[in-house]
Image (cartoon, rainbow, N blue to C red):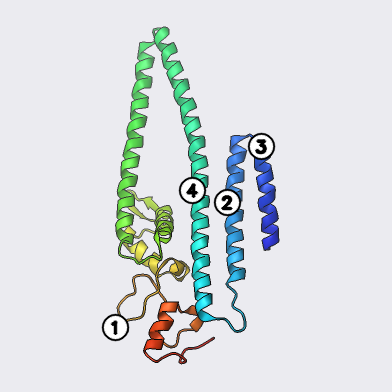
Amino acid sequence: MSIEELKKLIADLKVKQSETEDKGELAKLEIELQEAESKLVEAETEADTKPDETPETDDLEARVERLADEKLAKMKANMDKMAEKLAKTEKEKADLDKAQKEEKMKQLEADGKLQELAEMKVTEAEAKLRVLEAENTSLKRDQVVSSALASLEFKNERSREMARRDVIDNLEQNDDGNWVSKDGKTIASFVEDYSKDPDNEFLFRAKMNTGKGMDNPGGKSDTSSKKSVLDMTSDELLKLAQKGKLGTFSYR
């Protein structure tokens, strides 16, 4: 879809949101709205990052990095907004279920159905225990993910948070109860591959190649003199200038 079509879709979705009170429909519209807004940001970013015939490298690099930061900020804001609305809906549902259970327990006690009341209380206690166990398991998973990401050099905290959520969304528990990626890799191995994926390169700080065959933890592209000026950061260009190597790169 074009930028104008996406803007019209977003406007239509917002109108529908204002006209409905159905919680299920509101949640569906919110998800569609987040997707449309995300596509709009991507379309605008792609349009803004197309180089002119004679681009100013430093300005272009700064603009691309700024747009990437803005995109991450927008995505995080949208995700937080959607999570907040879903959490509110879930809380309202949980409060209603709790009130209904309490009312049923009072009725069972009033009717003298003590055995049924006891069984209901046991079931409720077991459910709460399962929730606590799940929260504890998720907490341990998140700690391992954060530890695996700690050695990577992200552009900023928004980039780190985006990567953390992305990694977690790709994890599942195996038959032994251990957290692994959906293709069976350990968390550490999956994070390593994630950091080297070119599609995730925009999350990390660019680094100069050491020339010693060492792995670059952020999966950054080669910053040698053969690299295109359009792919270089301002810091990379400055370092090349200091070494007297400006003018030997390609404008491909």
Please state the horizontal and vertical placement of residue 117, each as a whole percent of the image: 38, 16
Residue at image mark 4: 80
Asked which secondary structure carries label 4, the reply is helix
The type of residue carrying mark 4 is Asp
First in sequence: mark 3 vs mark 4: 3
Marks 2/4: CA distance?
A: 11 Å
The type of residue carrying mark 1 is Lys
Q: Which mark is residue 212?
A: 1
Residue at image mark 3: 20
Residue 175 relative to residue 88: left or right: left
Marks 3/4: CA distance?
A: 22 Å
Residue at image mark 2: 34
First in sequence: mark 2 vs mark 3: 3
Asked which secondary structure carries label 1, the reply is loop
The type of residue carrying mark 3 is Thr
**Is the Cβ of the residue at disc 2 closer than 8 Å to that at disc 4?**
no
The type of residue carrying mark 2 is Gln
Looking at the picture, does residue 12 appear above or below residue 112? below
The residue depicted at 29 percent of the width and 83 percent of the height is 212
First in sequence: mark 3 vs mark 1: 3
Marks 3/1: CA distance?
A: 61 Å
Marks 2/3: CA distance?
A: 17 Å
Asked which secondary structure carries label 2, the reply is helix
